[in-house]
Amino acid sequence: MKIFRFAASVLVFLFSAFCISAESVMPPDVYARMSEQSKVKATAVVEEVKILETTRQSTWKSVVFRLRHPMSEGVPEQFSGTCYSVDHEWQQPPAGGTIYFYPEMGDLVYVTVAADGGTITSYTYLNDVMESLFTDNMDKIRYGMGNARLDL
């Protein structure tokens, strides 16, 4: 009986020693708050997408936008933001709170960026009708996990 308890204790110790804790996805209101607090809010067109780094886990990108309609003060005619994407089958993203975006040249989007050149906090694809709805109802924009919607 003592041997069994000793073996069980050793197994529990070894199991806990080799377990790696993983970060979990944050609650949705955390992502919404990040978007709400972003300095840059606008409808824009993607002008350029540059790959900054590709790792086994993701691709880090810089995205240049051309402003169409500012939704916050001080948005320049051209601004940028960074994001992560998982572009290849061999990439294995770690567990955690990262939201992945997939910008392409020519995308018409409603985008929020922490600050010009900073992290993209939401990225919502638009068409001309949706863009008009967003610009006409700025006070009804609500945020989720990496995107925006209208609360009409």
Image (spheres, rainbow, N blue to C red):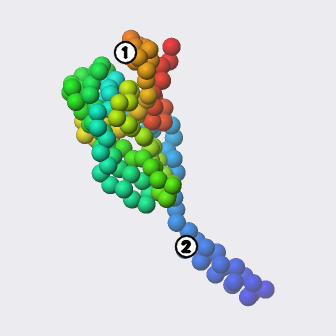
- Asked if residue 114 shows in the view, the reply is no
Question: How packed is label 2: few (under 14 Cα within 10 Å), some, or many (20 or more)?
Answer: few
**Picture coordinates of residue 47, whole percent (x, y):** 29, 33
Q: Say what secondary structure mark 2 lies in.
A: helix
The relative height of residue 59 versus residue 19 in the rendered view (above or below) is above
Q: Say what secondary structure mark 1 lies in.
A: helix
**Number of disc labels:** 2
Instruction: Determine the image quadrant of residue 112.
Output: top left
* For residue 22, side relative to residue 53 (left or right): right
Disc nearest the viewer among 2 and 1: 1
Question: How packed is label 1: few (under 14 Cα within 10 Å), some, or many (20 or more)?
Answer: some
Instruction: Give the residue drawn at x 52%, y 66%.
Output: 20
Residue nearer the viewer, 113 or 129: 129
**Picture coordinates of residue 140, whole percent (x, y):** 44, 17
Instruction: Give the residue drawn at x 41%, y 33%.
Output: 123
- Return the residue at label 2: 18
Mark 1: amino acid: Thr
**Picture coordinates of residue 90, whole percent (x, y):** 49, 59
- Mark 2 vs mark 1: which is more N-terminal? 2
Alpha carbon separation for disc pair 2 and 1: 52 Å
Instruction: Give the residue drawn at x 48%, y 36%.
Output: 145
Question: Residue furthest toward the front?
Answer: 106
- Return the residue at label 1: 135
Instruction: Determine the image quadrant of residue 66.
Output: top left
